[in-house]
Structure formats: C-alpha cells, structure tokens
Amino acid sequence: MVNAYILIQTEVGKAAQVAKEVGGIKGVATAEDVTGPYDVIVRAEARSMDELGKLVVAKVQAVDGITRTLTCPVVHL
C-alpha cells in the first residue's frame, strides 16, 4: 500500500468546494482545506505508485478549481 499527501493550490475562493469534491474520490482518505501556501491537503491511499499516479492525474487534477498539485509519497525509514 502506498500512502501520500497531495498538496493542492486552488483558484481564489474554491478551497472548500475542492476539498469536498476531492474528498469523495475513491482512494482519498481525507481532504481538508488549510491556510498557508496550499489551500487543500489530501491524504491518499493506493495499491502502487502507478495507481497513485493515476489517482492524481486522472481524478484529482480533473477537479474544477485546482491550479496546481504536489504529491508527497510517505516513506517508512
């Protein structure tokens, strides 16, 4: 299982809407709107890095109002 944080920047005033919509995507564990340089932080789960990539590119980035994403896979050292 691969876990990752997806940091999302949105259009002005769209953070709450984006968090709600992204939160409904299969593979997204949590989606919360936050303050700071990013507007929404998502915790995602996938079976592999390929599946994580597909989740981000095909589903998360397709949500209206998102301008940029940064995916940070969790590592266990």
Image: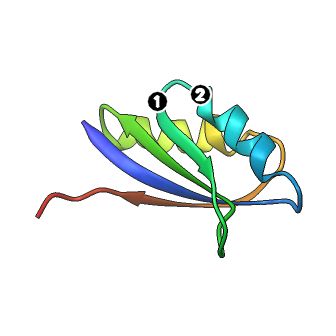
Helix, strand or loop at disc 1?
loop
Question: Residue 71 in the image: x percent, y percent?
Answer: 48, 58
Q: Position of residue 42 (x, y in %)?
A: 53, 48
* Quarter occupied by residue 51: top left
Residue at 88% x, 56% y is 13
Amino acid on which the number 1 mark rests in the picture: Gly
- The front one of 35 and 45 is 35
Q: Which mark is residue 8?
A: none
Residue at image location 65% in from the left, 67% down from the top: 38
Residue extending farthest bottom: 37
SS of the residue at dot 2? Answer: loop
CA gap, disc 2 and disc 1: 6 Å
Within 10 angstroms of label 2, few (less than 14), some, or many (20 or more) residues? some
Q: How is the image coloured?
A: rainbow
Image quarter in which the N terminus is found: top left
Place of residue 67 in the rendered image (x, y in percent of width and height, measured from the top left) = 77, 59
At which x and y percent is residue 4?
39, 50
Q: How many residues crowd mark 1 within 10 Å: few (<14), some (14–19), many (20+)?
A: some
Residue holding disc 1: 27
Which residue is disc 2 drawn over? 25
Q: Amino acid at mark 2?
A: Ile
12 displayed left or right of 67: right
> Closer to the camera, 68 or 50?
68
Identify the residue shown where x is 11% and y is 64%. 77
- Quick one: which residue is furthest to the left in this view? 77
Quadrant of the image occupied by residue 10: bottom right
Residues 12 and 27: in front is 12
> Quadrant location of residue 75?
bottom left
Instruction: Look at 66% across and 75% down and name the residue there.
Output: 37
Q: Is residue 38 left or right of residue 42?
A: right
Are the residues flagged by discs 2 and 1 in contact, CB closer than 8 Å? yes
